Image (cartoon, rainbow, N blue to C red):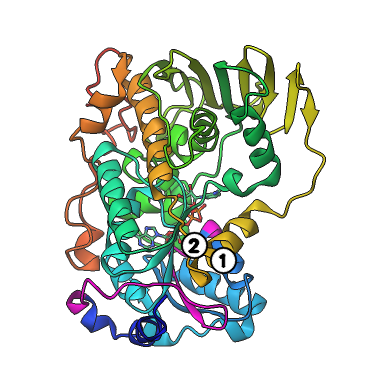
Amino acid sequence: MNTNNRRHFLKTTAVGAAAVSALPIERFALGASPGDTVKVALIGCGGRGSGAANQALSTGDSVRLVAVADIHEDRLTGSLANLQGRHKEKVTVAKDAQFFGFDAYKKAIALADLVILATPPGFRPMQFEEAVRQGKHVFMEKPVCVDAPGFRKVMAAAQEAKKKNLKVGVGLQRHHQAGYIETMKRIHSGAIGDVVAMRAYWNGNTPWVNKREDLEKRFGRKLTEMEYQLRNWYYFVWLCGDHICEQHIHNLDVINWVKSPEPGKYSHPVRARGNGGCETRKGKDYGEIFDHHVVEFEYADGSVCFSQCRHQLGCWNDVSEQAIGTKGTANLGGYTIRGANAWRFQGKGQDPYQQEHDDLFDAIRNDKPYNEAEQGAISSMTSVLGRMATYSGKDITWDDAVKSNIDTMVKDIDKVTFAEALNLAPQSKPGTDGLYRLSIPGVSNVI
Ligand SMILES: NC(=O)c1ccc[n+]([C@@H]2O[C@H](COP(=O)([O-])OP(=O)(O)OC[C@H]3O[C@@H](n4cnc5c(N)ncnc54)[C@H](O)[C@@H]3O)[C@@H](O)[C@H]2O)c1
């Protein structure tokens, strides 16, 4: 690594927000040696973003949180107070490095060496693209896209990131969880023979909901449709992707990993068929997403993954991944292999949420190859493919799915003023009954 370039980079990343658009494209990070301070910006100061910033700040002494960005002042100030409480000396966010609005991310990125992207996932592609354009290392939460145009954007930026030697971590933390890693090594070295079938479940309870009525009571005024959807983002496809993307991605990603024995070549299903709908979680507070999806994903070698994800109360729950091979079976999350080569993981591992940051910082400081963007994008698109299958009721191929031009993002949201953006209309609107229209299998067009 060229020390002069590195020091030049570290010095020059602290540019004013006004200079963002003038940033030279070639000013990219080459790494930071163990003693150098890594400046971090947090974009999306919610639950996970605050957790990820805490983990980044816990990687060592030479790391500082220098900028934050959000669209909600209450979330930003709450997160900052929390992080200051935990890491007093390491949180050095001046008032003029706290940015609000849909373009705030560009200004925060400009001040950092590493950016944490933890907004609702709909915004990830545009923010990742910008972070790479500005030459910054990235930790981004999963999913990294919620539709095909977003997938293509992330894949293109992932290539750029490689060319610029940027390190990119994605919050699919099972890749940093010792039990998963060891179980996977055994599957890939043939412990269960040829993997012919797999099972992935995220069957659980229903997550948080921010009801319009409660929000309007809290803020003492009517909210615009945009304000409401942003506060209740889980239930809108353009922001969340549906829970098959937001949660079940963890399990589908493990299945893709099972099918990826060659390092650097990440597999994906070639087609999906499914059923889904909304049986029990009905009402105007629950937007447009389904409460269950059941999908068969087929891989190029003919093996099939049977996937289920469900948000229904009072049912059997299970979050797990299993692989069935010609010589045995593996329970990935149970770290167990049964059959001819029976084995159980006995080791201990660090909290994977911390481990993924330790690994990313190690790569940044010691200039090791590190780019999880592509695998994160492929697994995010696997979830989107599953949603396309359940929303449409059709047999959908990967090749058709990735070509889709249905762009769910609200056009120009980060190009107009904040006030104007809060009055833009999301594509999904409630009817006169207050209810949102859900996709109808056999009728809805998803590609
Ligand atoms: N890896 C994991 O296990 C894990 C766990 C939880 C959440 N997550 C992921 O983390 C992400 C965030 O989830 P969360 O639970 O923290 O949600 P959250 O609602 O608590 O936080 C999201 C934050 O982003 C802000 N925001 C929204 N739009 C923005 C924009 N355009 N620009 C800047 N800020 C914006 C919100 O105001 C909020 O502060 C999601 O993608 C979620 O799937 C991952």
**Of the pair 218 and 339, the residue shown nearer to us:** 339
Residue holding disc 1: 362
Residue holding disc 2: 368
Q: Nearer the viewer, mark 1 or mark 2?
A: 2
Q: Position of residue 2 (x, y in %)?
A: 39, 79
Task: Tell me which segment is drawn in magenta.
Answer: 21-48
**Of the pair 433 and 3, the residue shown nearer to us:** 3
Please determine whether, in this image, residue 14 is positioned above or below residue 402: below
Q: Is mark 2 within 8 Å of ligand 1?
A: no
Tell me the residue at 30%/18% (across/down). 396
- For label 2, the crowd category at 10 Å Cα-Cα, with few meaning under 14, some 14 to 19 and many 20 or more, is some
The amino acid on which the numbered mark 1 sits, given as a three-letter code, is: Asp
Tell me the residue at 58%/48% (across/down). 173
Is residue 109 inside the magenta stretch?
no
Q: Can you see residue 446?
A: no
The label number, if any, that marks residue 45 in the structure image = none
- For label 1, the crowd category at 10 Å Cα-Cα, with few meaning under 14, some 14 to 19 and many 20 or more, is some
Tell me the residue at 17%/64% (across/down). 416
Q: Position of residue 340 (x, y in %)?
A: 76, 16
Count of marks placed on residues: 2
Dominant SS type (magenta): loop
Left or right of residue 22: residue 290: right
Please determine whether, in this image, residue 127 is positioned above or below residue 289: below
| Pointers 1 and 2 in contact (C-beta within 8 Å) | yes
Res 28 → quadrant: bottom left
Res 198 → quadrant: top right
Mark 1–mark 2 Cα distance, whole angstroms, equals 8 Å
Q: Position of residue 37 (x, y in %)?
A: 51, 82
| Quarter that holds the N terminus | bottom left
